[in-house]
Image (spheres, rainbow, N blue to C red):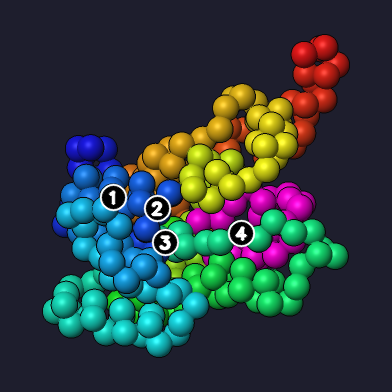
């Protein structure tokens, strides 16, 4: 991928969480191909093979001290040069309904999906300068009443957190935006029940599931100078599913499809 496709990324340092696979790995690879200096993080001790050639550091996003250690390393290693991007991609799901969700599982999902991005912005935003960008990875579940209650709640909360951050960090020239993937083919969604996959296709106007690379391209755009006057935005990458809001299924049934 030519750096010209994403102006300003070449040579910039960007941290990507949850980069061990799926969307995170796709984001890390695309950003590296565009010339960014990517610091990929995940909970594995060793870098996954798909991140070959990309700098890797272990990070538990729920651990405040781990974020502080990463911030210290970045500050020392970069010798005063600002961090230019953060992608809060790390996330987990737990597919249970309201009455079936234990407090332990609730706390675990909220810790990774919502507290993790908050800790990340607290730790790394002080290292950023004018023109830097933060991209938080939400979900189409944050735009509707999706059934996994902990996951859905965490993504709705991330919307609020992101808008607060965009408001507070704007005076420093730091942009904060949200990307809401729909049903993307990743190891996480591979575990979804077949009925869920079939229902998603029936609700998606483009009538296909998404690819991790399609999300990565929007993330790269938001990190680049091509989106320099865009902050506080929420961009669904879902084949039109949330825009249709179920109308596709109704329309197809009326038409006898």
Q: Classify 10 Å Cα crowding around label 4: few (below 14), some (14-19), many (20 and above).
A: many
Q: Classify 10 Å Cα crowding around label 2: few (below 14), some (14-19), many (20 and above).
A: many
Determine whether, in the image, residue 172 is placed left or right of residue 115: left
Mark 2 and mark 4 lie on one chain; the one further toward the N terminus is: 2
Residue at 26%, 53% in the rendered image? 49
Mark 2 and mark 1 lie on one chain; the one further toward the N terminus is: 2
Q: Is residue 155 above or below residue 194?
A: below
Label 4 vs label 3: CA separation?
13 Å
Residue placed under numbered mark 2 in the picture: 21
Label 2 vs label 1: CA separation?
8 Å
Image coordinates for residue 227, horizontal then vertical, percent:
38, 48
Q: Is residue 163 magenta?
A: yes
Q: Classify 10 Å Cα crowding around label 1: few (below 14), some (14-19), many (20 and above).
A: some
Depth check, mark 3 against mark 2: the one in front is 2
Residue placed under numbered mark 1 in the picture: 50
Disc 3 vs disc 2: Cβ atoms closer than 8 Å? no
Image coordinates for residue 47, horizontal then vertical, percent:
28, 62
Q: Is residue 232 above or below residue 218?
A: below
Secondary structure under tag 3 reads loop
Question: Is residue 226 in view?
Answer: yes
Q: Outermost residue, bottom direction?
A: 65
Disc 2 vs disc 1: Cβ atoms closer than 8 Å? yes
**First to last magenta residue range:** 137-164
Residue 93 tag number:
4
Label 1 vs label 4: CA separation?
22 Å
Secondary structure under tag 2 reads loop
Quarter containing the N terminus = top left
Mark 4 and mark 3 lie on one chain; the one further toward the N terminus is: 3
Label 3 vs label 2: CA separation?
7 Å
Residue placed under numbered mark 3 in the picture: 18
């Amino acid at each position: 991928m030519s750096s010209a496709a994403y102006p300003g990324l070449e040579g910039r340092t960007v941290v990507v969480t949850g980069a061990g696979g799926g969307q995170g790995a796709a984001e890390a690879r695309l950003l590296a191909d565009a010339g960014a200096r990517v610091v990929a993080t995940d909970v594995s001790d060793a870098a996954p093979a798909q991140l070959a050639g990309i700098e890797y550091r272990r990070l538990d996003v729920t651990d405040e001290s781990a974020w502080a250690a990463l911030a210290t390393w970045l500050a020392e290693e970069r010798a005063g040069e600002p961090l230019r991007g953060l992608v809060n991609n790390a996330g987990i799901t737990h597919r249970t309904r309201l009455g079936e969700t234990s407090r332990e599982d609730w706390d675990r999902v909220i810790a990774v999906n919502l507290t993790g991005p908050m800790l990340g912005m607290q730790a790394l935003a002080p290292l950023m300068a004018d023109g830097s960008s933060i991209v938080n990875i939400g979900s189409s579940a944050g735009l509707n009443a999706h059934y996994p209650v902990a996951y859905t709640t965490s993504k709705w909360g991330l919307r609020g957190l992101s808008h607060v951050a965009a408001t507070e960090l704007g005076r420093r020239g730091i942009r904060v935006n949200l990307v809401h993937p729909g049903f993307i083919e990743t190891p996480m969604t591979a575990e979804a029940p077949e009925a869920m996959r079939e229902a998603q296709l029936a609700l998606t106007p483009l009538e296909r599931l998404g690819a991790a690379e399609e999300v990565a391209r929007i993330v790269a755009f938001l990190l680049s100078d091509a989106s320099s006057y865009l902050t506080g935005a929420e961009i669904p990458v879902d084949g039109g599913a949330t825009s249709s809001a179920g109308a596709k299924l109704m329309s197809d049934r009326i038409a006898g499809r």
